Image (tube, rainbow, N blue to C red):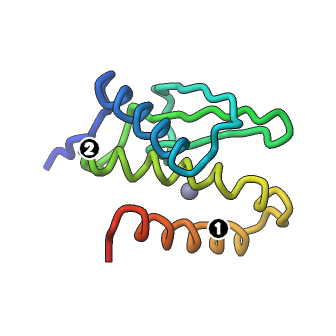
Amino acid sequence: MRVRLSKTSPVDFCLFERRVRLWLIRLGLTDWCIQFRHSKKKTDYRALVSYDTKEREAVFTLSVCWGTSTISHGEINLVALHEVLHLLLADLTDLLPSNKKSIVLEHATMRRLEYALLGRQ
Ligand SMILES: [Zn+2]
């Protein structure tokens, strides 16, 4: 059986950008200089954010290749929020050692915020 791989479109990228901007405003992260990229590189990530906390610069990247993940407005909103939450915690995580435990704790906190902000159980 052939596996069908999902790819995000320019329309999906526009939605991602709009949702990131919305979450940045809702969470008061308006002091950042933001850029967006729609990457064709093969990665394990559906989206990612890279940032420089001192320069207050961040780049949000949406991957074209989503592997076998389903693409929907809800999923794009979720990945947009997820990456914005990384930025929300950026100043704090910069103080932590870069190890697996810190990453797990960061994501556990983000998961709780995602549930709260998206009204999920
Ligand atoms: Zn993450």
Q: Element at badge 1?
A: helix
Query: With respect to residue 37, does 46 lie above or below?
Result: below
Q: Quadrant of ligand 1?
A: bottom right
Gap between marks 1 and 2, in whole Å?
A: 25 Å
Whether the residue carrying mark 1 lies under 8 Å from ligand 1 is answered with: yes
Q: Mark number for residue 106?
A: 1
Q: Image point 34% across, 32% down: which residue?
A: 15
Q: Assess disc 1: are there few (<14), some (14-19) or many (≥20) residues with their C-alpha within 10 Å of its C-alpha.
A: some
**Residue 106 lies in what quarter of the image?**
bottom right
Relative to 38, 93 lies left or right: right
Type of amino acid under label 1: Glu
List the residue tagged with mark 2.
73
Q: Position of residue 77 (x, y in %)?
A: 36, 47
Is the residue 14 above or below the residue 119 in the image? Answer: above
Residue 71 point in image, percent of width and height: 26, 44
Is tag 1's residue or tag 2's residue first in the polypeptide sequence? 2
Q: Indicate left or right for 31 with 38 as reference.
A: right
Could you say which is closer to the camera, residue 63 or residue 5?
63
Q: Position of residue 47 (x, y in %)?
A: 49, 42
The amino acid pointed to by label 2 is His
Comparing 41 with 89, the one in front is: 89
